[in-house]
Image (spheres, rainbow, N blue to C red):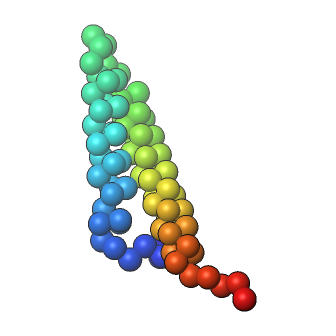
């Protein structure tokens, strides 16, 4: 993700991943029985999945918006 220069664009995946992890973990532990292993696995999958999907989407958006500004065809 070297093409993303803005610190805000680097911060968005972290904040999204933390938010999704909190809500997914709360949803898993809201029942009567909460298994620690299942809770930790859910938290890890939701964090890393959200982080990498958000990074991918931001990278695609940045790449598309930068390529629209430059006309390389002669």
Q: Nearer the viewer, residue 25 or 41?
A: 25
Picture quadrant where residue 36 is located = top left
Asked whether residue 52 is in view, the answer is: no
Give the residue displayed 42% in from the left and 35% down from the top: 41
Furthest residue toward front: 74
Q: Quadrant of the C terminus?
A: bottom right
Q: Nearer the viewer, residue 2 or 39?
A: 2
Residue 14 image offset from top left, x and y in percent: 33, 55
Q: Is residue 54 left or right of residue 18?
A: right
Figure label count: 0
Q: Is residue 72 left or right of residue 53?
A: right
Residue 51 image offset from top left, x and y in percent: 42, 52
Residue 12 image offset from top left, x and y in percent: 33, 57
Q: Nearer the viewer, residue 70 or 8?
A: 70
Residue 25 image offset from top left, x and y in percent: 31, 31
Q: Is 53 rendered above or below residue 5? A: above
Give the residue displayed 35% in from the left and 66% down from the top: 10
Asked whether residue 10 is in view, the answer is: yes
Give the residue displayed 43% in from the left and 73% down from the top: 4
Q: Nearer the viewer, residue 65 or 19?
A: 65
Q: Is 54 rendered above or below residue 1? A: above
Give the residue displayed 35% in from the left and 47% down from the top: 17
Picture quadrant where residue 60 is located = bottom right
Furthest residue toward bottom: 74
Q: Is 52 rendered above or below residue 67? A: above
Furthest residue toward top: 32
Picture quadrant where residue 45 is located = top left
């Amino acid at each position: 993700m070297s093409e993303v220069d803005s610190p805000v664009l680097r911060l968005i995946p972290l904040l999204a991943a933390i938010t999704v992890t909190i809500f997914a973990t709360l949803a898993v532990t809201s029942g009567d029985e909460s298994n620690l292993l299942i809770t930790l696995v859910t938290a890890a999958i939701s964090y890393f999945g959200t982080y990498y999907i958000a990074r991918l989407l931001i990278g695609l958006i940045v790449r598309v918006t930068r390529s629209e500004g430059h006309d390389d065809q002669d």
